[in-house]
Image (cartoon, rainbow, N blue to C red):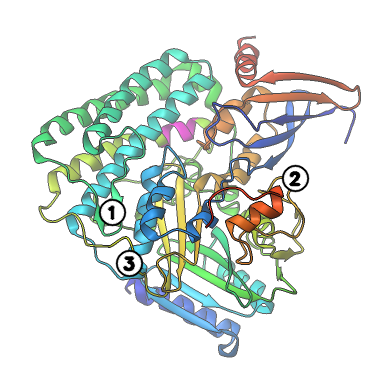
């Protein structure tokens, strides 16, 4: 290590972190030379816990893997168990699962867009977006009774029906969301503040995205056409007419545009579901003590942040023998490292936030100058302000 | 050609490449899913074939399973319309498998994960270190192995008995 290089640890603990992680940044002046990830601060042993609980109990654990993509995890879990059971679920429940999943995508993408605006110091946009996000939160509350952890999918179908009387109101709310998102698309594509902070920052080429197995919007922002809803359709996604958006830039701006476009597409999917949902039962019977026959299944779901995989191995008991979960953020960590290398310290917050990780607050940093034995602290807020000031010059 | 036929063809070509005798298990339970088991000596060859010739460029994750007799490592590889799970088994007393990070660069963290939690050692991994468990976690305790349950793990790691009996 040369005299000019500093090591900057970022993370891991802060109450505001959704998923604490630790990154060691090796910097040369303002330039990031290398990044070393250290994850696992939030490892709760969920896979091990699931092996000692019944399938119905696991429904509740798996929903709590993540607060933002709770429905994606539950959808993947129920699909996995149903595949081993060989159970065909009622048509109406598939539509309801898609409806909740796409609403969740809208809420997650708007949340991310607000956070991204905040990270680059554009707080007006952040407040606007989060105000409009309340519309989808209210909608989710009307549908499921909860603002997060909706507890909608269950093994064999869904737990609650959606009522036809409310459809006109749902349509109206979705129209509002679509209209507002369209406005933000205009803002993001033309506003100077965003262009200067996001265009050309944290670039990943298409070849790198494929090489490092990037997932979801992060891959699509680099021009990789990969979306589980198209690649390996589940539920009724093969019947829904929807478009997959890709960008070619691979930078933060492309990430923004892909997600904004996806938000509008998700609103369209929700409206399509409301127009086409068939009548009928919503649930097959599955008793809490039911055994699941021997077998294995791989379940793939396009969560908001990308490809989510669940793998189940059953040995004919009422508990899974082995259950594996891989959330999309782990798949994108190598890509974000690639994005950070060669960039400025001031860009760290927005580039890290750019992949929409399950943590978005670069909390507590210690700058260590190894040669001179100096050390100083900077918390996430100070780092954010440092970034904004740096660009004001 | 339907997706299912296409998937079957992929598995057939892999079988042909590796040789029938060395394909211990090959199933296509439904369209877009396939499971293939090969001896660990042939893993690299199979992975390179799937990556270069069959266009499965994406590694979704790596799962390790404690089967009770040995350790099974499952590589979930994917392309459009097919998610293929490539399995290898390795005994407890020699839990080594060749590292696929050279072929699939995106597998680096997943291999560190199975090393950490299940004690599967990927040979020739460029940067094999602990990824998930705490720095003070005792060496040689692999929590996802079946020899540990939640209670005995707590006793071993924290040195005290507490929590719910499971």
**Which element is circle 1 on?**
loop
Q: Chain of mark 2?
A: B
Residue B135: mark in rendering: 2
Q: Nearer the viewer, residue A215 or A192?
A: A215
Residue B25 % position (x, y): 51, 82
**Which element is circle 3 on?**
loop
Helix, strand or loop: magenta stretch: helix
All told, the count of numbered labels is: 3
Q: Is residue A77 above or below residue B30?
A: above
- Camera-near label (1 vs 2) is 2
Residue B39 % position (x, y): 63, 80
Q: Is residue B48 left or right of residue A128?
A: right
Q: Chain of mark 1?
A: A
- Please give the range of residues in magenta: A253-258
Residue B4 % position (x, y): 35, 74
Residue at image mark 1: A237
Q: Residue at x 72, y 50 (%)?
A: B159
Circle 2 Cα neighbour tier, 10 Å, few/some/many (<14 / 14–19 / ≥20): few
Pick out the residue farthest to the top.
Answer: A393
Q: CA distance from mark 3 to mark 2?
A: 40 Å
Circle 1 Cα neighbour tier, 10 Å, few/some/many (<14 / 14–19 / ≥20): some
- Camera-near label (3 vs 1) is 3
Q: CA distance from mark 3 to mark 1?
A: 29 Å
Residue A290: mark in rendering: 3
Q: CA distance from mark 1 to mark 2?
A: 43 Å
């Amino acid at each position: 290590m040369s005299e000019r290089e500093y090591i900057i640890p970022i993370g891991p603990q802060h109450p505001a972190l959704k998923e604490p992680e630790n990154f060691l940044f090796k910097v040369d002046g303002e330039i990031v030379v290398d990044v070393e990830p250290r994850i696992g601060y939030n490892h709760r042993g969920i896979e091990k816990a699931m092996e000692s609980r019944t399938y119905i109990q696991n429904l509740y654990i798996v929903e709590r893997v993540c607060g933002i993509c709770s429905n994606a995890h539950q959808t993947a879990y129920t699909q996995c168990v149903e595949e081993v059971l060989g159970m065909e679920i009622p048509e109406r429940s598939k539509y309801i699962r898609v409806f909740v999943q796409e609403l969740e995508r809208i809420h997650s993408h708007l949340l991310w867009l607000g956070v991204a605006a905040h990270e680059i110091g554009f707080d007006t946009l952040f407040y606007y977006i989060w105000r409009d996000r309340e519309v989808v939160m209210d909608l989710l509350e009307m549908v499921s009774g909860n603002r997060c952890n909706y507890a909608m999918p269950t093994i064999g179908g869904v737990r609650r029906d959606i009522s036809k009387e409310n459809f006109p109101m749902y349509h109206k709310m979705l129209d509002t969301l679509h209209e507002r998102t369209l406005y933000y698309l205009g803002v993001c594509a033309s506003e100077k503040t965003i262009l200067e902070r996001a265009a050309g920052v944290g670039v990943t080429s298409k070849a790198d995205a494929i090489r490092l197995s990037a997932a979801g919007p992060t891959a699509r922002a680099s021009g990789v056409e990969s979306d589980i809803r198209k690649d390996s359709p589940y539920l009724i996604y093969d019947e829904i007419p929807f478009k997959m958006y890709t960008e070619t830039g691979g930078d933060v701006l492309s990430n923004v545009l892909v997600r904004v476009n996806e938000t509008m597409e998700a609103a369209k999917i929700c409206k399509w579901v409301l127009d086409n949902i068939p009548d009928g039962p919503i649930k097959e019977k599955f008793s809490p003590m039911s055994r699941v026959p021997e077998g294995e299944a791989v379940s793939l779901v396009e969560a908001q942040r990308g490809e989510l995989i669940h793998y189940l191995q059953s040995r004919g008991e009422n508990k899974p023998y082995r259950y594996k979960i891989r959330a999309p953020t782990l798949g994108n960590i190598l890509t974000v490292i690639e994005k950070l290398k060669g960039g400025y310290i001031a860009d760290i917050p927005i580039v890290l936030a750019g992949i929409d990780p399950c943590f978005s607050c670069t909390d507590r940093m210690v700058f260590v100058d190894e040669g001179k034995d100096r050390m100083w602290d900077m918390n996430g807020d100070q780092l954010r302000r440092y970034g904004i000031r740096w660009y004001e010059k | 050609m339907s997706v299912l036929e296409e998937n079957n063809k992929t598995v057939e070509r892999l079988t042909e490449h590796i040789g029938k005798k060395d394909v211990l298990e090959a199933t296509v339970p439904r369209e877009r899913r396939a499971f293939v088991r090969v001896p660990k000596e042939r893993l690299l060859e199979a992975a390179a074939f799937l990556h270069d010739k069959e266009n499965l460029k994406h590694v979704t994750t790596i799962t390790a399973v404690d089967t009770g007799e040995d350790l099974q490592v499952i590589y979930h590889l994917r392309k459009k319309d097919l998610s293929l799970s490539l399995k290898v088994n390795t005994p407890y007393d020699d839990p080594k498998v060749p590292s696929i990070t050279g072929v699939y660069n995106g597998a680096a963290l997943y291999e560190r994960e199975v090393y950490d939690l299940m004690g599967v050692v990927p040979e020739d991994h460029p940067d094999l270190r602990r990824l998930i468990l705490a720095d003070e976690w005792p060496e040689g305790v692999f929590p996802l192995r079946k020899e540990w349950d939640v209670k005995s793990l707590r006793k071993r790691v924290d040195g005290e008995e507490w929590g719910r009996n499971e």
